[in-house]
Amino acid sequence: MQLQPLNDQQLIHNYLGGDERAFEELLNRHKNKIYTQIYLFVKDTALAEDIFQDVFIKIIDTLRKGKYNHEGKFLQWAMRISYNMCVDHFRRNKRRPKVAPTETFDIFDVLHVSDDNAETQIIKSETHNKIRSLIDQLPPEQREVVILRHYADMSFKEISQLTRVSINTALGRMRYALINIRKLVEENQISLQKY
């Protein structure tokens, strides 16, 4: 008989009871999603790692002080903390996040890609770069929803909780983002090839 893995609440309870491994398991369970979200906002590996560590220091601190009360919603709570820390970083530096590839990390590298011929790979790469540059041109609120939805793979409910807007507002921002991207494609006569 296989034992059921502990849920987040049980791990938090065990951690607060002195089981350090419970927190390690909680961290391992969610670190990829949280780190990816941070990285997509800051676009810098070292900075993303620093903010990621700060997020988990804050999580540990909040848990130890007994101030955590998000029953069964640990990931959304952790994502909100990481989002807020990214926003704080940009406020301090007076700039908005940009979605752009870097030499060390490209979100499309972690997506499943079939073995295509060289021509198809070049078309895909060019298309991804075009899409990223279009996303960069969106107003900040629309760009934020696109990043959270398509890069951090969050639901509109999670996005609305994270950005503290209604689901309808988040959906509206995504709708306008898509309209704006289509407009930019037409204005710039960009060819986004299907693959």
Image (tube, rainbow, N blue to C red):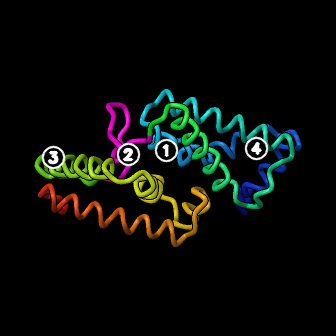
For residue 117, which numbered disc appears in the image?
none
Q: For label 3, count other residues whose C-alpha is less than 10 Å away and answer few (under 14), some (14-19) or many (20+).
A: few
Is residue 102 one of those drawn in magenta? Answer: yes
Q: Residue at x 59, y 36 (%)?
A: 52
Asked which secondary structure carries label 1, the reply is helix
Of the image marks 4 and 2, the number of the one nearer the N terminus? 4
Of the image marks 3 and 1, the number of the one nearer the N terminus? 1
**Residue that badge 3 annotates:** 122
Q: What residue type is labelled 4?
A: Ala
Up the image or down, 154 lies above or below 132; here it is below
Please name whichever residue, 174 or 13, is drawn nearer the observer in this view of the structure: 174
For the stretch drawn in magenta, the main secondary structure is loop
The part of the chain drawn in magenta is 96-112
Q: Residue at x 76, y 58 (%)?
A: 70
Please name whichever residue, 195 or 78, is drawn nearer the observer in this view of the structure: 78
**Residue that badge 4 annotates:** 22
Asked which secondary structure carries label 4, the reply is helix
What whole-number distance in Å separates the C-alpha atoms at marks 1 and 4? 22 Å
What whole-number distance in Å separates the C-alpha atoms at marks 2 and 3? 16 Å
**Residue that badge 1 annotates:** 36
Asked which quadrant contains residue 19, the reply is: top right
Is residue 79 one of those drawn in magenta? Answer: no
Asked which secondary structure carries label 3, the reply is helix
Q: For label 4, count other residues whose C-alpha is less than 10 Å away and answer few (under 14), some (14-19) or many (20+).
A: many
Q: Which amino acid does label 2 sit on?
A: Ile
Foreground disc of the pair 4, 2: 2
Of the image marks 3 and 4, the number of the one nearer the N terminus? 4
Q: Which amino acid does label 3 sit on?
A: Ile
What whole-number distance in Å separates the C-alpha atoms at marks 4 and 2? 29 Å
**Residue that badge 2 annotates:** 107
Asked which secondary structure carries label 2, the reply is helix
